[in-house]
Amino acid sequence: MSKSSTTTDTSDWLHIPHAGEMLVSEFMEPLKLDTPALAQAIAVDPVRLQAMIDGKTRIDGELDLRLSRYFRMSEGFFLRLQTSAELRTAKRALNGELERIQPRAA
């Protein structure tokens, strides 16, 4: 019996977009907004906004509130996008390890 770890070919898995990618594709591109214009509209440093768009920094509560207000979304919308992407990425990285954890009996 082999004791080698199971590997999964991930080449066919779909890309999991982070909050910054979703901001660009679902909001900025359709409205033809560039980073400097959006940054000015929500009163944040364009460098900070670009770092979030590029996935170099996480979105925080303040930035979420500004973006949510500007785009008329519910507070926490962009934070939920980020959390969802992070959870899906983590689950994918665990590669089946969660199934080996037995839930604690009540």
Image (cartoon, rainbow, N blue to C red):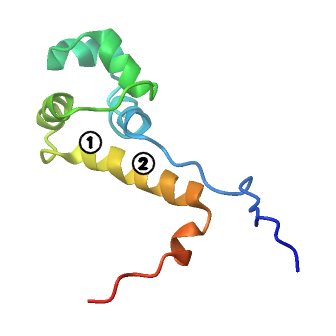
Tag nearer the camera, 1 or 2? 2
Q: Relative to residue 88, is residue 64 depicted above or below? A: above
Q: Residue at the far right: name it.
A: 1
Image coordinates of residue 29 in percent, x first then y, are 40, 30
Query: What kind of residue is marked 1?
Result: Phe
Q: Residues within 10 Å of mark 1 (few under 14, many from 20)?
A: many
Please name the residue shown 31% across and 19% down the image.
49
Please name the residue shown 37% across and 39% down the image.
19
Image coordinates of residue 104 in percent, x first then y, are 35, 82
Please name the residue shown 23% across and 32% down the image.
60
Comparing 6 with 3, the one in front is 3
**Whether residue 77 can be seen here:** yes
Report if the CB atoms under discs 1 and 2 are less than 8 Å apart.
Answer: no
- Left or right: residue 69 versus residue 7 is left
The residue under label 2 is 86
Comparing 90 with 28, the one in front is 90
- Left or right: residue 95 versus residue 25 is right
**Alpha-carbon distance for marks 1 and 2?**
12 Å
Q: Relative to residue 24, is residue 51 depicted above or below? A: above
Image coordinates of residue 51 in percent, x first then y, are 39, 19
Q: Earlier in the sequence, mark 1 or mark 2?
A: 1
Specify the quadrant of the image occupied by residue 18.
top left
Q: Relative to residue 65, is residue 51 depicted above or below? A: above
Q: Which mark is residue 78?
A: 1
Comparing 31 with 87, the one in front is 87
Quadrant that contains the N terminus = bottom right
Specify the quadrant of the image occupied by residue 57.
top left
Specify the quadrant of the image occupied by residue 67.
top left
Please name the residue shown 42% across and 48% down the image.
86
